[in-house]
Amino acid sequence: MKNRYLFLVLLFLCPGCEKYLDQKPDKALVVPTTLADFNDLLNHSDFMNFTPGLGIVAGDEYYMPKNGLDALTNLIERNSYMWEKDLYVGTTFAPDWRDPYRQVFYANVVLEGLGKIIPSDAEKQEWNRLKGSALFFRAWAFYNLAQLFADPYDPATADHILGVPLKLQADVNSRADRGTLRQTYQQIQSDLQEAVKLLPAKTVVPTQPSKSAVYALLARIFHNIEDYGTALSYADSCLSIKNELIDYNTVNPALVRPMPRSAENQNVEVLFHATAVRYGFFSSSLIFPDSVLVKSYEENDLRKTLFFHATTGRFIGTYTGRSPLFTGLATDEVRLVRIESLARSSQKQKALDELNQLVVTRYKKGTYVPITESRPLELLELILMERRKQLFSRGVRWSDLRRLNKDPRFSKTLFRKLEMNLLSLPPNDARYLFTIPEDEILGSGIQQNNR
């Protein structure tokens, strides 16, 4: 399949390459036209199941000393870590922008292709699933782009702030302006609300979206924009379909990567499998988890050994069960969305009960002492800390920092100490917004972000 659709890949990577496009492609290089073709295209997990990774690099979960930064061959990683204003320094290598828009392109190809097919009764279910999947992938890509290349959502300003370009056509020569942030989120929600009507409740393959994954993503989105009542409703809908949790007592800590492998459907918590762009930053031997956070795990907390290597301190607890970082959707995150939403909706006891139900599965059997905190602010602080500990390196922390920085009670200044230099990133700083690659600005004429 990868070879069959090389024509599409080249078409996406080389818009405006007239000489190439003027040539008649080899018969093996076909544009998809059948349901089987579209299924193959959406199942291309090497393209469709990646998420941006620079938010993890720029966040507060990892520390890298100067010699580690100097060894990075990709300047965009180093500059993101150091919160430089100029991220790209002349390079056009920008997978955090390119890869989501490739997903959008593939989704649009499928949506337009399906629009040309009148399915038979026998094909209708598959036609619906493919359309729902394409809508999910497009919404997934737009949302991930908005976390880096658009400001945090505020309903009071969303009509006056730029969103991300909403590319809704497969034609690589068509242009899309940025529109407003409200329009970006409206498009994401519209795609997902249509997708949920078309997709099956669950899928056998975790790289494919399902109804439960749509609800999980909607819960994440509304949690991120601080509409906690709606986030709670979608979390409930997701967990009514799938709510399993791993008992960490059953996980083997002797394995190099202890967690069950999500892509092989061995991890019962995973709703949708995705991984972060594989930057050299993540594979470096000179990347260290935040020591203060690591020390916050109690002695009987199994995450202390399942997440972090006893000797090197490296993070080994990714839900992929392999080296790539898991950045998909899982029931533990949805439960934490529900717990925080309950607490913020003055349902403290329900929040407390659910928090204990989750955390007890992370402790050595018989050692967990239930949390009894009843003060609203202190309970919320505990919930936010559990969110940090459970969702470490899952790709949500950058969005959480942007969300929480709007509340003085939870805002945080980030620091980097590089030999004699101390760098800082204050709450709500302009550098929480990533600049768009310069070749995109030159090619499309869209407005650049101020960083």
Image (tube, rainbow, N blue to C red):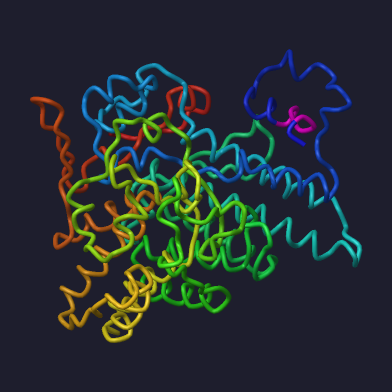
Magenta range is: 3-8
Quadrant of residue 6 in the image?
top right
Identity of the residue drawn at 38% across and 19% down: 73
Residue lying at the far top of the rendered structure: 19
User: Is 419 placed above or below 222 here?
Assistant: above
User: Is 148 placed above or below 364 here?
Assistant: above
Relative depth, front residue between 205 and 81: 205
Give the quadrant of the N terminus: top right
Identity of the residue drawn at 26% across and 37% down: 431
Identity of the residue drawn at 46% across and 50% down: 327
Identity of the residue drawn at 35% across and 45% down: 315
Quadrant of residue 29 in the image?
top right
Q: Position of residue 234 (x, y in %)?
A: 49, 73
**Residue 423 part of the magenta-drawn span:** no
Relative depth, front residue between 3 and 91: 3
**In-image side of 129 versus 249 (left or right):** right
Q: Position of residue 334 (x, y in %)?
A: 44, 68
Q: Position of residue 196 (x, y in %)?
A: 63, 67
